[in-house]
Image: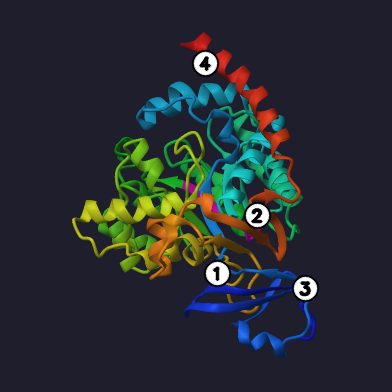
Amino acid sequence: MSAGHIDLLIHDVAVWTPDGPVMDGAVAISGGCIHRVGAASDIADWPEPAQRLDGEGMLLLPGMVNTHTHGAMSIFRGAADDLDLDKWLNKHIFPAEARFAGRETVYWGTLLSCAEMLKAGVTTFCDGYFFEDAAAEAANRAGLRAVMGQGIIDFPSPDSPDPSRALETARQFLDRWKDHPKVKASVFCHAPYTCSPETLVKSHALARERNALFQIHLAESPGEAEQIRGRYGLTPGRHLHRLGVLGPGTLAVHCVHLDDEEMDLLASSGTGVSHTPESNMKLASGVAPVPEMLRRGIAVGLGTDGPASNNDQDLFGEMRSAALLHKVHCMDPTVMNASVVLDMATRGGARALGMEGEIGAIAPGLRADLVLVNLDRPHLTPLYNIPSQMVYAASGADVHTVLVDGEILLRNRRFVHLDVEEIMGRVGEIAGKVKEFLVKGS
């Protein structure tokens, strides 16, 4: 990054920085990174930029970080709703995946999710599924920053009919994407109840060997807790602790049914957590003890979960749900205040993924993953408090422009590179076959 070169200058914009707002601000971008942040009145002394972007009437936020989704499952959006987790997963989703999950469906389903997330201001997402190589190709085409987890499970899966080969599939996936600048390969063990202790230990060892994130669903439902106690005599959190798979490179997803000691184990080990309130509410899984996790210093980010169990990937909506859910659950309007929740969707998500020094804030040296939100809207007027407005009033539909690595991917709500009509058309063709399958099976 040259000290005297600016690729893009965003000026006359309200900027949300780690130190609070700069209401008439400017941000200079060079080499895909944030070069300078200051007041618009200072830019006369800055080098002349190659391009300018007028931010009048807008707010510049750090790109949103979606810490948990299964992007390819957009092909199953709305196909099996209003069910508990066990019936939803075993009676509907697993059979549908066995029939339809393949390279092509995963590619187009993930690409549709990338388009949806971009329109809602997500610049980084953490994914886990089968045929994850195809999902990574979709993320790469979309231009998003992504952590892509190759799924591992202890029964025949769409991309590993022989479960004993699943670990080798993950190893090959890690090798193929190890040097990519924006797509980070990771390992995703589905859950403690679908993966044996041996599988968990070996998968975690592979992730540590390759310096990759280890992802796992943890303590999502009361049924999971009962299964793990019955098999191993321990709660899910203690089970993973005993196996040695908690730690700074582990992301535990959901974490709904944890007791105080289990939360202490997550905190002391440095394990990150993805909180998915809307999916947990929709499946009636319960309410994760997020305020208690935050008090312990656990890195907690927000996730939407997959489009089949949410059913959208709007992290603005997730922020609002997280804030309101915990207030009513705790019967305390002061918990999960707007600043805390906005931080969870940005810097907290980066911290949970082990990317805090790379993304999640608007500060010099970090990647230029940025979102312009249009403030000139009736429901965003007047503006007294930025976090409050973003959490309680804004939605993904207010996103105007999105940049990743300083490259504009969405401008004035129009995709710069993606052909969204083609993407929706391809997913529509897949959905026609899924619908026929579901009707026959009903």
Secondary structure at numbered mark 3: loop
Question: In the picture provided, is 147 more to the left or to the right than 281?
Answer: right
**Mark 3: few, some, or many residues within 10 Å (few <14, many ≥20)?**
many
Q: Which mark is residue 356?
A: 1
Q: Which mark is residue 7?
A: 3
Q: In this view, does 301 lie above or below 15?
A: above
Question: In the picture provided, is 226 more to the left or to the right than 424?
Answer: left
Q: In this view, does 161 lie above or below 43?
A: above
Q: In which quarter of the image is the N terminus?
A: bottom right
Q: Residue at x 32, y 65 (%)?
A: 337
Looking at the rendered image, the disc whose residue lies closer to the viewer, 3 or 1, is 3
Looking at the rendered image, the disc whose residue lies closer to the viewer, 4 or 3, is 3
Alpha-carbon span between mark 1 and mark 4? 43 Å
Task: Pick whichever of labels 1 and 4 is earlier in the sequence.
Answer: 1
The residue tagged 4 is 438
Alpha-carbon span between mark 2 and mark 4? 38 Å
Q: Which residue is drawn at 66% across and 44% down?
A: 170
Looking at the rendered image, the disc whose residue lies closer to the viewer, 2 or 4, is 2
Q: In this view, does 205 lie above or below 197?
A: below
Q: Residue 419 carries which label?
A: none
Viewer-proximal residue among 388 and 262: 388
